[in-house]
Amino acid sequence: MKKIKNIIKLGLIAITVCSFSSCTDLDETVYSSVMSDNYYRTKQDIINAVFRPFEGIYSTVSQANWSEECCADQLITPSRGTWWVDGGVWAKFHRHQYDDLVEARWNQEWNSIYLTIAQANVILDDLNRLSPDHFGITGEEWDGFKGQLRCIRAYQYLRLLNAYRYVVLCTSSDQAINKLPENQKQVEPKVLFNFIEKELTDCLSILPIKNGQSGNGIQQGQCTKAFAAGLLVRLYLNAEKWIGEAKWSTCEEMCARITKGDFGHYAVAQNWYEAFDWNNDTSNEVIFAFPSSYGMNHWHMLQNHRTVYGRSMPYGSANYLDIEGDGERNPQFALSPSYDNQNPPQLFTYELGMVTQKFLKYPGDVRYKQYKNTSNKSREGMFFLEGRIPNARMNGGYAYDPFNQYVIYLRDQVGRFEGKAPEGIISNPNYAESKYENGDFNSGLYCVKYPFYSFSGGYFAEPDYTIMRLPEIIYSQAECLIRLNRADEAGKLLNSVRKRNYENFNVDIAYKPEGNVELDLKEMLDEWGREFLNETRRRTDLIRFGRFQEEWWDKPRDKDDHYELFPIPQKVLEQNKYLKQNPGYPDIIR
């Protein structure tokens, strides 16, 4: 089992904070159920408090994933008979029809982010009035604790800037300050951008540097200098879209500092899966990850609504993977299909989505194999590909649908195939059209980014949830270089990562000048999609490349670009008379 990361033993600091209290509903009184002076007694109390907002962020990873993947081109949540219909909300997400201001799925991103910002503000204000000497903490450590909170708060504000653009900037828990009219109004994107930039730049001085050359170890789950620098990379990479000012050179320079080791030793792993494996706290590729363990918190691998990867596998896979002790899988996130429902099927012609075809473009991709566990702590392959799912508990048996009506046969298509899936024949002609509403348990292939080792083998749900890894920095630098007309340098950078993904990394796979493949922005976006499939970032990449409005499977071209931002929730608008709705969405009557 992996070592326990003592610094992230998150105590339950008892602070009751409404998600709108500090930032949107400023007429509401906020109470602390435990007075701060009574709570902070030891150094461990300080540590517990500092990392409490981290736990809040980790527990909402599913909401971030909905916002980034459900409205993009690579992952889908089709109906499976009566399953996953949910009033058509997932189809609306996919088709960019999120005008409903009370729908929880696209409202929860706002709510959960502000909750953790409010938590960070409360604890920062407490630290500002407490004395480190009282707890036997050095001034450097104390500043580092503040840096943790400032960095993770900046991370949350970066998400708000990305999703909503016009938001309230709240940095205090003092309600007298927050109730001032000027502090209840939205700030311009440039103001928020500058705030995030300054916070993260300050953090480069006060946060700890990564120790050693064997992964994050006990620092897993802490903000480090490299994480702050990586968040600056995200800020600069998207600056042209977010504030109308391109910062490609600034972004490229920050990337270079990270890859040179200015903020600690990081290195690309020899294989693609190390950053997601059970012992990824030892991986030098991981810059920041939330600690996870089955006996503690493992939000990303749960078997409920808070998960991302626990619902990224087909129904019937539990016995195949020997994880039936955690229940059967509830298949939500499948790959967008590449084929229509003709017999024989024909390839769609969309430029976006088409996930399997993007991987098949370059032969010998070691990721593009059927997922299987090769031991209780090793795996191969990143996909559930076409075909039946073996039942490990039954010799020669296969997985059935939940109602035991047909053997599941996965297809790179969406349709009501049911028991005729092996032949590729639609069983009910009323559900022949390839669209969200017509799926079944055969519909769609799956990406298994994190391993699901045997439930009883000791390594089940052990991987930490990786938020940032070194290839993101390398890919960001490469994109900047392309935009700065230095594509040859960009090609070499990408090849330094890509070479691990192919059995024979030859000149027909490598980008110029080391190979024959032309690297342009279109190919860059495709490569982002291959390397970071199902890593909660696709919406942002599509928007930055100006392609979010285009058509893809079961989604026509958008009429305009207002869906690049999400609507501000109705309840939030009702609670703060100063807020204005984002352009293109219905506003409330005031």
Image (tube, grey):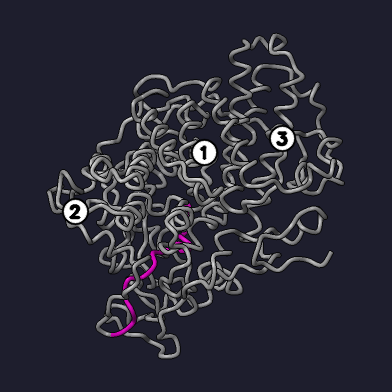
Span colored in magenta = 326-342
For marks 1 and 3, the one nearer the N-term is 3
From the viewer's perspective, is 218 left or right of 26? Answer: left
**Which callout, 1 or 2, points to the residue nearer the camera?**
2
Could you say which disc has been placed on residue 171 in the image? Answer: 3
The answer to which of 46 and 489 lies nearer the viewer is 489
Q: Residue at x 48, y 47 (%)?
A: 238
**Which callout, 1 or 3, points to the residue nearer the camera?**
3
Q: CA gap, disc 3 to disc 2? A: 48 Å
Residue type for callout 2: Val
* Label 2 SS: loop
* Label 1 SS: loop
Residue type for callout 3: Thr
Q: Residue at x 30, y 67 (%)?
A: 397
Which residue is the site of mark 1? Answer: 295
Q: Residue at x 40, y 62 (%)?
A: 74
* Residue 202 on the magenta span: no
Residue type for callout 1: Gly
Residue 458 showing in the rendered view: no
Q: Main secondary structure of the magenta part?
A: loop
Q: CA gap, disc 1 to disc 3? A: 35 Å
The quarter in which the N terminus is drawn is top left
Which residue is the site of mark 2? Answer: 517
From the viewer's perspective, is 69 left or right of 164? Answer: left
**Which callout, 3 or 2, points to the residue nearer the camera?**
2
The answer to which of 203 and 142 lies nearer the viewer is 203
Q: Residues within 10 Å of mark 3 (few under 14, many from 20)?
A: many
* Label 3 SS: loop
Where is residue 116? Give x, y as percent: 66, 40
Number of callouts in the render? Answer: 3
* Residue 338 on the magenta span: yes
| In contact (CB < 8 Å): disc 3 and disc 2 | no
